[in-house]
């Protein structure tokens, strides 16, 4: 018998809270369990490709000019809040259309100081809270994975590429005494908040992280080097429990206490259906053969854990 691992979440006190984290390891789920799972825009079928560590199905690609991924709920960050947006990207050495801006991470709406975007424009990185843009100097249209970070704190936006602070080639990173006023909105990945909606990213995106504080230069460098950051807000500790059998044909069982109902999603984040748990099991016979993400909730609709299953 093969078992699926479920991550069971309690609370532990641990600096910067990781608001959302996307590994793209075959799913569009938010690894923090804060509920910011992604869904694909209409007519967009995401493609999972090899990521920064050369492991299969650990990055997202396939964006057309109008395609994007977005959260189903507004991000908790807005207004002049501190923040850090981080992503690994690979544009491809043969990309000849890098003059057109290509969105990586976007938030807010397309009006003065109301959006906060991370883009590649003219083959270099750019932070665009509009109307002021901070434009770096590092050329990114290569076949290599690049780590891009934008922090915002004390009304200053700072760009980093591969752990090092960018010297701006043009624009400014100082947003004045009033700072910015980002409109509360869903997070968007793989495109911009531009009015045209036609800045889909050409290439692959991996390991997107959103923090609710501006990381320091040392923290950004640690992030680039894979050194875990210290967190002082509530983070979720993980206890492994089992879902079985996996692959499964009809009845999926699990040994998590307190599960009242279960939601099932396909790998693009689309909810297939929701069922009440009966004696720690659910009947999934009606699902077609595929890979699914299962989320487990208690009676208070608190998320207890997740698992990935294969339906035969």
Image: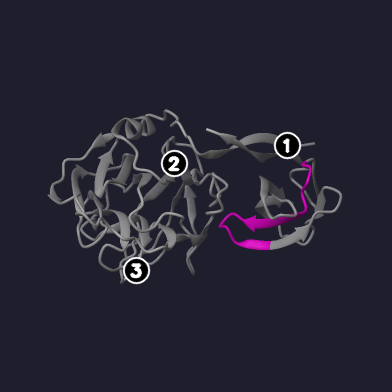
Residue lying at the far bottom in this picture: please name it: 196
The residue pinned by badge 2 equals 51
Question: Is residue 35 in the magenta section?
Answer: no
N-term mark: 2 or 1: 2
- Marks 2 and 3, how far apart in space? 26 Å
Instruction: Give the numbered dot on residue 304.
Output: none
Q: Where's residue 296, x and y in %?
A: 71, 50
- Marks 2 and 1, how far apart in space? 28 Å
Residue lying at the far front in this picture: please name it: 177
Secondary element at tag 1: strand
**Where 41 sits versus 214, above or below?**
below
How packed mark 1 is, by other alpha carbons closer than 10 Å (few <14, some 14-19, many 20 or more), is some
211 vs 34, left or right, is left
Residue 62 appears in the picture as rendered:
yes
| Picture residue at 27% right of the left edge, 50% below the top | 94
How packed mark 2 is, by other alpha carbons closer than 10 Å (few <14, some 14-19, many 20 or more), is many
Q: Where's residue 192, x and y in %?
A: 33, 61
302 vs 51, left or right, is right
Secondary element at tag 2: loop
**Where 196 sits versus 73, above or below?**
below
Instruction: Give the numbered dot on residue 197.
Output: 3
| Picture residue at 75% right of the left edge, 37% below the top | 2
**Closer to the camera: disc 2 or disc 3?**
3
The residue pinned by badge 1 equals 241
- The answer to whether mark 2 and mark 3 are in CB contact below 8 A is no
**Closer to the camera: disc 1 or disc 3?**
1
Q: In terms of image quadrants, where is residue 217? A: top left
**Where 266 sits versus 109, above or below?**
above
**Where 54 sits versus 308, above or below?**
above
What span is colored magenta in the figure? 256-272
């Amino acid at each position: 018998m093969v078992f699926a691992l479920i991550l069971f979440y309690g609370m532990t006190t641990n600096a910067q809270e990781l608001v959302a984290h996307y590994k793209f390891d075959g799913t569009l789920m938010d690894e923090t369990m804060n509920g910011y799972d992604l869904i694909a825009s209409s007519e967009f079928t995401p493609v999972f490709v090899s990521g920064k560590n050369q492991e299969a199905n650990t990055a997202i690609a396939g964006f057309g000019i109008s395609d994007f991924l977005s959260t189903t709920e507004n991000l908790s960050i807005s207004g002049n809040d501190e923040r850090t947006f981080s992503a690994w990207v690979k544009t491809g050495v043969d990309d000849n259309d890098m003059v057109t801006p290509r969105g990586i991470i976007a938030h807010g709406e397309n009006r003065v100081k109301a959006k906060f975007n991370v883009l590649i424009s003219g083959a270099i990185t750019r932070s665009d809270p509009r109307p002021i843009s901070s434009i770096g100097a590092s050329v990114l249209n290569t076949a290599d994975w690049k780590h891009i970070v934008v922090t915002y704190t004390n009304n200053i936006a700072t760009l980093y590429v591969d752990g090092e602070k960018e010297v701006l080639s043009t624009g400014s990173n100082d947003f004045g005494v009033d700072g910015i006023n980002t409109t509360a909105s869903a997070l968007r990945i793989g495109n911009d908040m531009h009015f045209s909606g036609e800045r889909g990213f050409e290439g692959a995106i991996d390991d997107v992280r959103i923090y609710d504080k501006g990381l320091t230069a040392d923290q950004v460098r640690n992030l680039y080097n894979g050194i875990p950051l210290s967190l002082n807000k509530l983070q979720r500790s993980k206890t492994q429990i089992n879902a079985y059998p996996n692959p499964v044909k009809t009845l999926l069982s699990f040994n998590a206490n307190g599960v009242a109902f279960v939601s099932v999603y396909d790998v693009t984040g689309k909810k297939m259906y929701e069922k009440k748990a009966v004696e720690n099991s659910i009947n999934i016979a009606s699902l077609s053969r595929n890979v699914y993400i299962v989320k487990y909730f208690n009676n208070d609709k608190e998320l207890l854990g997740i698992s990935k299953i294969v339906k035969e």
